[in-house]
Amino acid sequence: MTDQNFRPYRKKMMQMMRPYVPGEDMTGISVAITDTVEEGGMIAVNVNDPKDLWYVSKKFFAENYEPSRHGRPEL
């Protein structure tokens, strides 16, 4: 896809996440239809709405995230 309107953007804030625990109840956690929930995936949380949780696949997490050296925001 080569659309001249696309530009690169970087998020301004950190994303709070925790590891997915194999077998955990995923009720209330959004999972993309294309994702396979597996060990190594992460559960992300919206710091402005702690009930807003979503699954981040192992592959996407590995390709796009790294631990932050900054302090932990409050939930």
Image (tube, grey):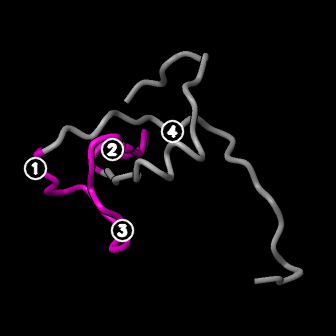
User: Where is residue 22, by image quadrant?
Assistant: top left
Quadrant for the C terminus, please. top left
Q: Is residue 33 left or right of residue 26?
A: right
* Circle 2 crowding by C-alpha within 10 Å: few under 14, some 14–19, many from 20: some
| Residue type, numbered disc 1 | Asp
Q: Residue at image x 73%, y 48%?
A: 10
Give whichever of discs 2 and 3 has the lower sequence position.
3
Q: Is residue 7 left or right of residue 19?
A: right
Give whichever of discs 3 and 4 has the lower sequence position.
4
Q: CA distance from mark 2 to mark 1?
A: 12 Å
Q: Is residue 8 left or right of residue 36?
A: right
Residue behind mark 4: 15
Q: Nearer the viewer, mark 4 or mark 1?
A: 1
* Circle 3 crowding by C-alpha within 10 Å: few under 14, some 14–19, many from 20: few
Residue behind mark 3: 32
61 inside magenta stretch: no
Give whichever of discs 4 and 1 has the lower sequence position.
4
Give whichever of discs 1 and 3 has the lower sequence position.
1
